[in-house]
Amino acid sequence: MIDIIGVSKRFDGKKQVTALDSVNLHIRKGEMVSLMGPSGSGKSTLLNLIGGLDRPSAGEIKLDGELLGGLTDDALTKLRRDKIGFIFQFFNLLPTLNCLENVSLPLHLRGWSTAKISERANELLNLVGLSQRLDHLPEELSGGERQRVAIARALSVYPPILLADEPTGNVDSSTGEEILGLIRDLHSRFQTTVLIVTHDKGVADSCGRRIALKDGLVVQDVTA
Amino acid sequence: MILLRLISWQYTRKHLLRSLLTIAGIVLGVAVFVGMHTANQSVLTAFTQTVDRIAGATQLQISAGEAGFEEDILERVQNVPEVRVAVPVIEAVMNPQTKSQANILILAVDMTGDRSLRDYALESGDESFIEDPLVFLAQPDSIMITREFAAENDLKSNSELTLNSMDGPKKFIVRGIMKSSGLTTAFGGNLAIMDVYAAQKIFGRGRRFDRIDVAVQEGLDPAAVQVKLEKVLGSGFQVEPPSSRAKQFESLSSVYGMLANITSLFALFIGMFLIYNSFAIAVTQRRSEIGILRALGATRRQIQVLFLAESAVGGLVGAGLGVVLGILIARGIAGSLGQFLGEVYGVAQKAEEVSSDPRLLVGAMVLGVVTSLIAAWIPARNAARVDPVQALQKGRFQLLTAGENRMRRWTAFGLLSFVGVSLAFGHGRLIFYAGYFAAIFAGVLLVPTLGLWLARGMRPALKAIWPVEGTLAADSLIQSPRRTSGAVTALALSVSLIIALGGMTQAAYASIEEWLRVALNPDMYLAPTQNFTDRSFRFPAELASEVEKLPGVRRIQAVRIVRLPMDGEPVMFVALDVSSVTQEARLPIVSGDGPTMYSDAAAGKGVIISDNFALMHNRKRGDVLTIPTPGGPLQMPVLGVVVDFSDQKGSILLDRSVYDKYFKDTSSNVIRIYLQAGVTVGQMRERIAAQAGTRFRYFVFTNEDLRSYILKITDQWFGLTYIQIAVAVLVSILGIVNTLTVSITDRRRELGVLQAVGGLRRQIRGTIWLEAVLIGAIGLILGCGFGAVALYYALETSARDLSGMRLAYGYPFRTVLALIPIILGSAFLASLAPAEAAVRGSLVEALEYE
């Protein structure tokens, strides 16, 4: 499903920093994988590269056998919107749009019909338990509720891959449990391949496969 | 100072493009101010230099307006013991049809006395006539030219030069070529000297002079001699030092100067909103920086001074760039402006060099800095009031607080009430202009509220058409009125200016066309020059008589047009046979009883004045005017007021018999011809040619020619106002670019999210484009509303203080239709670069942007 072949990422500045150093990984379809490591170990960088938000300095990434390196920015965006759902630590909801509009956003970008969008957005918000909050703005929601909206948005087209960057990092522990439960539930229901970047060992342990990074290198790769 | 370097400079460097856009308004405002004034100053300087160089050692000049006077006045002046030398002069511009096709200024003098006033240093030619002027006088075909003119036209000593005189073509012999000196550089070096009595024939002066140049006896005070001469000659003559001619020209062209002031001040006013906007945004964005500074011990005053110092430096840089750009603009337009003003006012000058007045440049710099400081005052005060604890907390600060908005609305309501009162009860100038400014200020205060309402109103429609791009564009405006209100205000003000100018143009053209139709209806005109405003040449009375007798002529009117001083300003007098005019045309009457007014004027019992003269000189029917004439002051009552567009400064219509009697001048500037039924202009042209042959210099114009000429001059005037429009639109567009640049920085994360969840580049671009077009649309809608009010005030201002002409109010719907694609298109163009910037850059950084 996801092939990472000799991927390195370096950031140029006054001093060159190597965030990832020749990483090789193969993630199978339907796996639920956690990426752990201390700050600066390269886990978020790896997630961004897999999601096509950034490009590697060296190496190749394949999604479903398709090489990301050869794609134009717009082709990469199309691949991202069809195959990948993102969940961010700080939710990244648009503050002026209500829950329904935030969830509808990716569907509008795909050019779906209004009726179809409405049906799907309602269905997703119902799925994450927010059917009573459709017209609420993000600022009117709790942290957990915002993350649920973000998850609903990430699932808008039921993408085969779900990438979550510290999805429980900005909520309290009980809400974090709820969020994680929701992700696990979606994973089992839709057989979605899930990659979760986390600092939380509990979150990592709940995943079927645990990968640890340190200084840009894979130092542990354990499958339960 | 250290804060300026450590904090402000770093911020400016980081946001260099935005900083440049911020000062662009100042650059343009100052550039227009410097450019238009420097060009005007250059024209004025060229005229002054021509006057100075031609004056030589002349201390006083005696004239009777443009009418000139008879030869016997010279003797009366020469008999005054305090006068050392008095020389008759005729000064006129003509086109000698030489190789360079350039106009030449003819200075015609009496050589016997003139050598003590002017130095004719000859380079080549017959020195003998300079040694003995009688030799020059004995050969009336003598002419002296400058070395520059000779070189440009391949002329040498004893070359022939044929001038098209009032007596037909006349050959002159170049008897001297003058060295380059002070005198010969007058009028750009295109100068010729001839005998004054020869010039009388050439220019159709009869036995009259234009003026007398005087030098007083050694040791005497010219001012005292001036008083003596005024006493001897009477109030019909003007005795003044040569420099006062420049003042008259300055007075004539004052409307242009005022227009230049309005244009540049308006540009600066709009520019002020850009600066206000940028600083208001900067204060919001730099809250945490301000909080840190306050936490580290910076006082409120230090914060306020820091922001004001930033604005002062920005203003100084902008003004400096504006001065440079302004001088470049002046270089580009001085020549054509000189030609235009010469054509409008019939005054000879040749502006070739740009002369910058240091006081003007310093004034422009001060204007730029002060404008910048005023604009930054409120944001700087807000920066000083930032609470350090709140500032260090994360959150959104873009929203206008409800209290702030409510206060603006109440203030605007108060101002509008004052506007209503000023319109209902205020007829004085002070209260009128106070009302005008209150209306502008109220509009400015209402822009954020009205803009917000419009954005909210448009959101559903935009969402329906472009679900993502439209919604986000509308939300961007709704969410951050502070970010966009400056640009919307600048645009609304610009649009209102365009509406006002459009309405004025429409009204002016309608009125002028109606006036041309009703008042100027002869079938054809005979003029001694190709330019209707050039009064260098005059027809002798006999030509009018000969034309009148031609078969097919139903009626002629020999018109004499002169400027005479009234209330210290040169005013146009139009002398013609009033009874004849009333048979053919009726000028629209503003005040007065039609038949009585015209019959009394025809009987020489008074004058009829134009409504713009009445308004600008505060005269009305029944007032008595004192007209200076060589025959003494002439007291004439105002019999009526009519609509007449003959001159910007107003005109006075008097009967030809009165003019001839008091000015002893039977010459004409133009002969109006009415044809009998069935006679064509072409036939009459042939009959005139057969009759006049080459005995006279004349040009034939049809009614359509005159209409086109007047409309061309009108076009040129309004052409000046188009500069205002261009500057206003340009500054507004810069405002939109500035706003969008800030907007994409503010919304970097939002745009990043949009891309992360599948937004294509064209969709991101579309969002920015729509935001720009939405700003344009809101500015346009508000501007169209404000324009309705601005047009009223523009028409009133024009009537009260510019042209004195009362023009009918008519909303310029066609201008609005033309503006829709211009403003929306410009807004779209303004968004192209920011939209590209929005899709470039790192997506990862955008998502992490805080």
Image (spheres, rainbow, N blue to C red):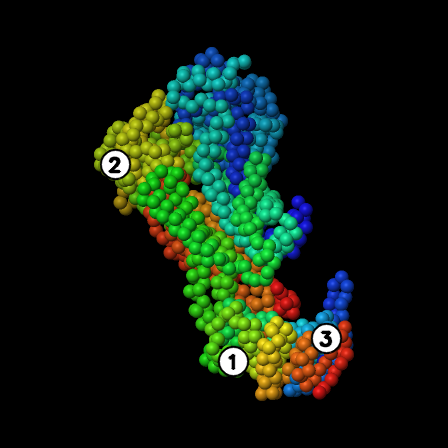
Residue at far front of view: A174
Q: Is residue B165 left or right of residue B652?
A: right
The Cα–Cα distance between marks 1 and 2, rounded to whole angstroms, is 86 Å
Q: Nearer the viewer, residue B344 or B311?
A: B311
Task: Give the residue pinned by disc 3.
Answer: A37
- Subunit under mark 2: B
- Subunit under mark 1: A
The Cα–Cα distance between marks 2 and 3, rounded to whole angstroms, is 98 Å
**Both on one chain, marks 1 and 3?**
yes
Binning the other alpha carbons within 10 Å of mark 2 as few (below 14), some (14 to 19) or many (20 upward) gives: some
- Subunit under mark 3: A
Above or below, A209 against B507 in this view is: below
Classify residue B760 by image quadrant.
bottom right
Task: Give the residue pinned by disc 1.
Answer: A129
Q: Is residue B144 left or right of residue B68?
A: right
**Both on one chain, marks 2 and 3?**
no
**SS for dot 3:** loop
Q: Amino acid at mark 1?
A: Gly
Res B592 label = 2
Mark 1 or 2: the one toward you: 1
Q: Is residue B817 visible?
A: yes
On the rendered image, what quadrant is the C terminus of chain A found in? bottom right
Q: Is residue B452 left or right of residue A58?
A: left
The image position of residue B269, as x and y in percent, is 50, 47
The image position of residue B394, as x and y in percent, is 59, 62
Q: Is residue B27 visible?
A: no
* Cβ atoms under marks 1 and 2 closer than 8 Å: no
Which of marks 3 and 1 precedes in the sequence? Answer: 3
Q: Amino acid at mark 2?
A: Gly
